[in-house]
Amino acid sequence: MSGYVLEASGVSVRFGGVRALTGVGLGIRAGEVCGLIGPNGAGKTTLFDVLSGIRRPDRGRMLLDGADITRRSPVWRARHGMRRTFQRQQLFGQLSVADNVLVAQEWRGGGGGLAADLLALPARRARERARRTRGERVLADCGIGALGATYAGGLPVGQARMVELARAAADPPRVLLLDEPASGMSAPERERLAAVVRRLAEEGCAVLLVEHNVAFVMDLCTRVVVLDLGTVLAEGTPAGVRADPLVREAYLGAT
């Protein structure tokens, strides 16, 4: 047993003649916040697509709690605890903030038609109350509890990012993949974001974070992986990555 909740090994992806990822491997443990940094074109989003099941790798495999998920669908992975946000906002603009968060929990409800609905009505009402209570709590933790009735489509970028985070955390995640979550946020919003991510990690979630704000990554993450041209250039603690000559020269500025 590796001790990793999510593990990828030998992941390679090619787009025509371009190698987006070559033999990439990484693992994330429960309670860890791991940062993934690198320049545009390094392969960060492609790796997220592979981990979340949106794209199948040409080579390599992925494990979730020790089970091979390489050929599992994004829906299967989501229902087994993997959550993801995207670079581009993916909110339901015509729904309220509260309903955006409720959507993430709907899969736990049952079907069966009208007869089943009538027979299970008390249980359904109890589940609905529980979902709404958790949604309200998550929105409050994200500092947007007062926005529950607001339509999501009219929110500024920073608040919309927090709604995406709240939706990802509404159904307790086992693994959380965050793709540039701090983009467009103010300093106070970034502080709130960091606090929520830390709390999720303390609750046992394994977090992988892609972010171009290197200072934010170094302050928040317990470990950092650096991608360069689709390969892992360096990996270690924030202090160790900062001290790596190749990383300092290529990304952080050699001074």
Image (cartoon, rainbow, N blue to C red):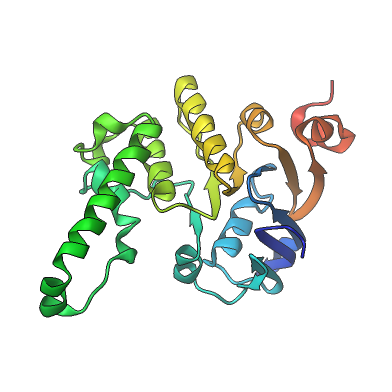
Left or right placement of residue 116 versus residue 107 in this view: left
Q: Is residue 102 visible?
A: yes
Which residue is depicted at the point 60% across and 62% down? Answer: 51
State whether residue 160 is above or below residue 167.
Answer: above
Residue 50, quarter of the rendered image:
bottom right
Quick one: 126 or 114, which is closer to the camera? 126
State whether residue 58 is above or below residue 186.
Answer: below
Q: Position of residue 104 (x, y in %)?
A: 35, 56
Which residue is depicted at the point 89% across and 33% down? Answer: 245
Q: Quadrant location of the C terminus?
A: top right
Left or right placement of residue 182 versus residue 14 in this view: left
Which residue is depicted at the point 45% across and 66% down? Answer: 79
Q: Quadrant location of the N terminus?
A: bottom right
Q: Position of residue 84 (x, y in %)?
A: 49, 53
Quick one: 110 or 253, which is closer to the camera? 110
Which residue is depicted at the point 63% across and 58% down? Answer: 47
Left or right placement of residue 140 versus residue 146 in this view: right
Q: Is residue 16 visible?
A: no
Quick one: 232 or 80, which is closer to the camera? 80
Residue at the limit of the structure toward the right, as seen here: 245
Residue 164, quarter of the rendered image:
top left
Q: How many marks?
A: 0
Q: Position of residue 213 (x, y in %)?
A: 61, 31
